[in-house]
């Protein structure tokens, strides 16, 4: 009898469903375009999407023309790639890389459905530190774009463990199929190592207290395998803070600690250094590179590398100052606030 009952559709819980899985409309942007638009108008990013940042500024600088060959080193949701692809026809080709084994096939499928197949787009699941291999296959690149860090899809999905606001495994890897998760890293770390990671990667002011609490907690048998377990132990480590400010300060320390661990498990500074070292040899004469970063440690590396290549005459022009997202963009997408865009042109 039960089989004959019409299946009830899952109720969409108002305009703000709480859990990631309940946001099935946002997770299917192609089918629910109007709902997605509404979410974006409220200054939020729909759960299964990433809103590309500084698109106008990047496209104005890259000046892509039909027939060119270039690389989007951080494919993500493919928003920048899509704008690039529109400028490349006829005859051009875009290479795009990403390490995320879950989001990459979805993005590939979306771009293919929009008519961008292998004749114009080659997507590779690889780290951008291997940019030299792309240039070997593609030839000298007319343009390169890197939009560093994580996508909104990665941050918002609790199963990826990027956010302490929701319970999830403490993973933080861009590619969970390779390397150590943050939980595994914490299991065998010393106080000194953890303190250094927190200080060097994120300038965490309470690095000593947090490292002490985590390492001694684990030594005493405490389990830190989920995002909220880590958040809880950080809050306990900082319980000496005055009550009127503690909530905000603990939140900031959690943000910095998660960021520091994410940078560590993905070796984000190491791969950026390799990318910057190989970059000049991959660019064609007059080739343009734009790098968008969201962290002072990344921006410092990009700035130093570009300035040194300019002094050596390898780059003919570099951005005098970083370009910031417009006030309008920051209002409509708060994730744009910390973005810094730097560019350079090969001599
Ligand atoms: C900010 S998102 C890019 C968003 C993209 N520009 C868009 O418009 O949708 C950053 C992406 O870069 C990827 N990524 C980060 N570091 C990487 C690396 N070293 N090699 C390849 N991909 C990387 C992440 O997995 C993520 O998908």
Image (spheres, grey):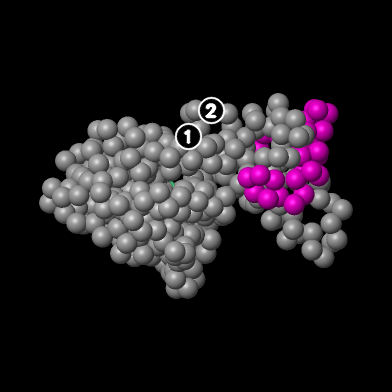
In the image, 50 versus 54, the foreground residue is 54
Who's the residue at 46% across and 50% down the image? Answer: 308
Residue 52: which quarter of the image?
Answer: bottom left
Who's the residue at 30% across and 64% down the image? Answer: 60
Q: Is residue 331 magenta?
A: no
Q: Which residue is mark 2?
A: 179
Callout 2–callout 1 Cβ contact below 8 Å: yes
Q: Main secondary structure of the magenta part?
A: helix
Q: Residue furthest front?
A: 312
Q: Quadrant of ligand 1?
A: top left
Q: Which residues are magenta?
A: 199-227
Q: Which residue is mark 1?
A: 175
Q: Position of residue 317 (x, y in %)?
A: 36, 59
Q: Please determine whether, in this image, residue 28 is positioned above or below residue 179.
A: below
Q: Position of residue 21 (x, y in %)?
A: 50, 46
In the image, 304 versus 172, the foreground residue is 304
């Amino acid at each position: 009898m039960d089989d004959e009952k019409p299946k009830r559709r899952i109720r969409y819980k108002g305009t703000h469903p709480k859990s990631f899985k309940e946001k099935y409309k946002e997770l299917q942007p192609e089918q629910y375009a109007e709902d997605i638009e509404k979410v974006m108008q409220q200054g939020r990013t729909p759960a299964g999407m990433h809103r590309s940042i500084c698109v106008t500024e990047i496209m104005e600088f890259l000046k892509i023309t039909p027939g060119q060959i270039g690389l989007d080193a951080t494919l993500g949701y493919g928003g920048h790639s899509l704008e690039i692809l529109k400028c490349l026809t006829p005859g051009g080709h875009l290479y795009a890389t990403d390490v995320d084994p879950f989001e990459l096939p979805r993005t590939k499928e979306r771009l293919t459905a929009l008519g961008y197949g292998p004749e114009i787009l080659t997507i590779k699941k690889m780290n951008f530190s291997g940019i030299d291999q792309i240039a070997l296959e593609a030839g000298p690149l007319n343009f390169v774009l890197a939009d560093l860090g994580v996508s909104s899809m990665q941050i918002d999905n609790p199963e990826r463990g990027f956010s302490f606001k929701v319970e999830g495994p403490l993973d933080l890897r861009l590619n969970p199929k390779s390397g150590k998760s943050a939980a595994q890293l914490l299991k065998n770390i010393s106080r000194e190592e953890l303190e250094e990671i927190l200080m060097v990667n994120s300038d965490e002011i309470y690095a000593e207290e947090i490292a002490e609490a985590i390492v001694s907690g684990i030594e005493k048998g405490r389990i830190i395998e989920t995002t909220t377990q880590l958040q809880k132990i950080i809050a306990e480590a900082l319980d000496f803070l005055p009550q009127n400010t503690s909530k905000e300060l603990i939140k900031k320390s959690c943000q910095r600690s998660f960021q520091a661990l994410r940078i560590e498990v993905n070796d984000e500074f190491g791969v950026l250094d390799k990318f910057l070292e190989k970059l000049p040899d991959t660019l064609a004469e007059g080739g343009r590179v734009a790098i968008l970063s969201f962290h002072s440690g990344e921006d410092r590396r990009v700035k130093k590398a570009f300035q040194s290549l300019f002094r050596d005459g390898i780059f003919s022009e570099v951005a005098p100052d970083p370009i910031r997202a417009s006030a309008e963009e920051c209002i409509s997408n708060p994730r744009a606030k910390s973005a810094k865009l730097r560019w350079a042109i090969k001599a």
